[in-house]
Image: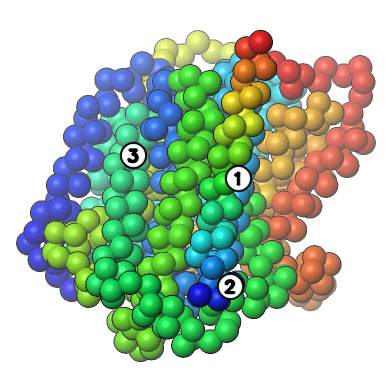
Amino acid sequence: MTPGIFFGLIGLPGLLIAASIACYVIQGKRDQQRKA
Amino acid sequence: MTAEPVTLIVFGAYLVFLVIIGLASSKKSAGGLEDFFLAGRNLNKWTVALSAVSSGRSGWLILGVTGMAFMSGFQAIWAIAGYITAEIVMFFFVARRFREYSQATGSLTIPDLLESRFPGGSKALRVVSSLIVVFFMIAYVGSQVVAGGTAFSSTMGLSQSGGMWLTAVILLFYVMIGGFHAVSKTDVLQAGFMFASLVILPIIAIINLGGFGPILEAMQAQGAGFVDPFAFSAGAILGLLGIGFGSPGNPHILVRYMSLKNVSEMRQAALISSLWNVIMGWGAVMIGIIGRVYFPEIDMLPDGNHEAVFTSLGQELLSPLLMGVLLVAILAAIMSSADSQLLVGASALIRDIYDKLLHRGEEISQARLVAYSRLATATIMLLAVLLAFSAETFVFWLVLFAWGGLGACFGPVLLLTLYWKKLTRQGSLWGMLAGLIAVLMGSQQPAWTYAFLPDINNLFATILFGITNAAVPGFLISALVAVVVSQLTYRETSAQASTER
């Protein structure tokens, strides 16, 4: 598997999923701060 | 092609379900305009998340993206990465404020929300924004009716016009009866069908091929341009990513944010929607790429049409039952967008034009407004069908720039409405118009304007690193005009409403 294929099939979707989870965590912390 | 009996049964069962959901939602949608157009802001996180995804993804994902991946390989990943990124940002960071602000101001529609910053005075902002919404939603629905006609004619052996009428009647029935309740619940069902087909088909293909090996071989056989995501120019990649600029301004997606019951569930809804988007997007790309294993040459697809790779691969690999699911997925993608667009068009007619403009300040009962909303839904559908039958070329011409045009028209102004207290009514109005005109001129410049204007698309590409997708300059121009005009017209003493409501 070339680096390009890896990026196209796994890397980019993986990055988007990681970004979504990171945003989820960030918003969770902001929600906690709001409550506090 | 006429489908197998079991395929037709799946098709029929799906249509019956839509009708049942419409009937089951009729009572809930009758309470008032908020119930009919926003499900009383009472939806759970799953419904909001899946409804937002399936409303935004029309047949373009299932037929267009699979076809793009078949033709150009990894070029397609940039097209989906653009809108997925934009929707991650919108859902996680904007949707909550959008939801809270819309409730605080009693906004049910996008023109409502834009106008709510500047109560009293001129109604030009509401007039212009609602006419733009109505106009584009009629064109969108018209194009979906044509696509539905094609889906029915190719699977059930109906004529194209018979298929168009069947699409229109089923859509109209459940939207008119069930309003937003029915639209969002059918969206969940439709998201399930789209998900199933975009995930099951690649998995079956990989099992059938005995692993990834043959797929990698077929990809490499197509050449470096097919397998290298960076084989394209920066302008081409940025232009494809720029498809995402449509997401912040298309009203049929944005109103989903307003309908969530519990605001604290917004981040969960955002996560569900984002993961769903990624899985469906990459499922579509995989189908296009795997298509190259089964159909190495484009001539092997019906009529040499690259957008037929989805159905051709299904016929090659699936049982009649699963083929039924796959065909329903195409119709589901069409229906789930069309129903949302139909309802948004009706909301602009009744809430914005009838209630807030023509009968401003008058007490009209909610029951009467709901009855009129149902009539407006039928009117929008009738206009869309008439347009689809009489001016199909015009409909597709409009839809070509509708996504980017609406994004540039409403996206920057809505974001500024929520986040910038110096935004003025004039800034909003001129920003909207500038964005729309920029996208029109950049993507569909009328021939007669070449007599006194340069090639606008070339001009944009020269300035913006070779980007030829007019949505990108349109969005930037809209934001720039809104900010500059607001700076020129903002008065400290004037009653600019606060964004902190």
Lower sequence index among marks 1 and 2: 2
Q: Can you tell which quarter of the image residue B483 is in?
A: top right
Find disc 3 in the rendering and name its residue: B188
Residue located 56% across and 60% down the image = A11
Give the percent coordinates (x, y) of residue B240: 62, 64
In the image, residue B417 above or below residue B485 = above
Name the foreground residue: A28 vs B235.
A28
Q: Chain of mark 3?
A: B
Residue located 45% across and 66% down the image = B285
Q: Amino acid at mark 2?
A: Gly
The mark found on residue B112 in the picture is none
Quadrant including the N terminus of chain B: bottom left
**Label 1: element kind:** helix
Label 2 vs label 3, nearer the camera: 2
Quadrant including the C terminus of chain B: top right
Mark 2–mark 3 distance (CA, rounded to whole Å): 35 Å
Would you call the spot at circle 2 few (<14 residues within 10 Å), some (14-19), or many (20 or more)? some
Would you call the spot at circle 1 few (<14 residues within 10 Å), some (14-19), or many (20 or more)? some
Give the percent coordinates (x, y) of residue B128: 65, 39
Mark 1–mark 3 distance (CA, rounded to whole Å): 24 Å
Q: Is residue B80 visible?
A: no
Give the percent coordinates (x, y) of residue B11: 17, 54
In the image, residue B474 above or below residue B364 = below
Name the foreground residue: B14 vs B195.
B195
Find disc 2 in the rendering and name its residue: A4
In the image, residue B463 above or below residue B221 = above
